[in-house]
Image (cartoon, grey):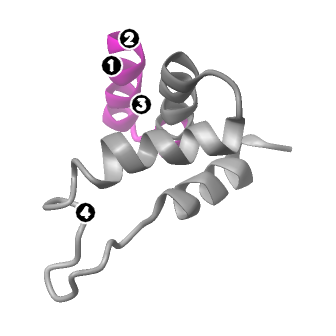
Amino acid sequence: MERLIKSIQHALDNENYYAALFVALALPDICGKLEFGEGNGFRYKKWCDEYFIKKGTEVYRNKISPYTIISSEDLFALRCAMLLP
């Protein structure tokens, strides 16, 4: 996992934003598969909800609005748009 995170940082350092985004969007797939097994969309959204959205509440909420700025559904849709042909 550390190698993947370092690859994201390396891509950002080199202004290779698409590569950073591709890897970042793939991480919940990898983590979800390890934790929850089968069920691609289900595991992706479940992992994002449990480890990204809820645990990052103070970071990923708009300061004006109490609502989450991005949902697990949004992240999965972006992942599908970027990673699938």
Are the residues at dot 1 and dot 2 in contact (C-beta closer than 8 Å)?
A: yes
Marks 2 and 3, the one that precedes in the sequence = 2
User: Is residue 4 found inside the magenta-colored segment of the image?
Assistant: yes
Magenta residue span: 1-21
Mark 3–mark 1 Cα distance, whole angstroms, equals 9 Å
For residue 20: magenta? yes
Is residue 20 found left or right of 65 in the rendered image?
Answer: right
Tell me if residue 45 comes above or below residue 14 in the rendering.
below
Q: In which quarter of the image is residue 13?
A: top left
| Sequence-wise first label, 2 or 4 | 2
Q: Using the rendered image of the protein, determine whether residue 4 is visible from the camera's viewpoint.
A: yes
- Type of amino acid at the residue the image marks with label 4: Tyr
Q: Position of 56 compared to 18: left or right?
A: left
Residue 64 lies, in percent from the top left, at 16, 88
Assign a secondary structure to mark 2: helix
Image mark for residue 6: 1
Q: Residue 25 carries which label?
A: none
Label placed on residue 60: 4
Toward the viewer: 11 or 56? Answer: 56
For label 1, the SS is helix
Task: Give the residue displayed 36% in from the left and 37% down from the top.
Answer: 12
For label 3, the residue is 11
The percent position of residue 60, horizontal first and vertical second, equals 25, 62
Q: x%, y% of residue 30?
A: 54, 23
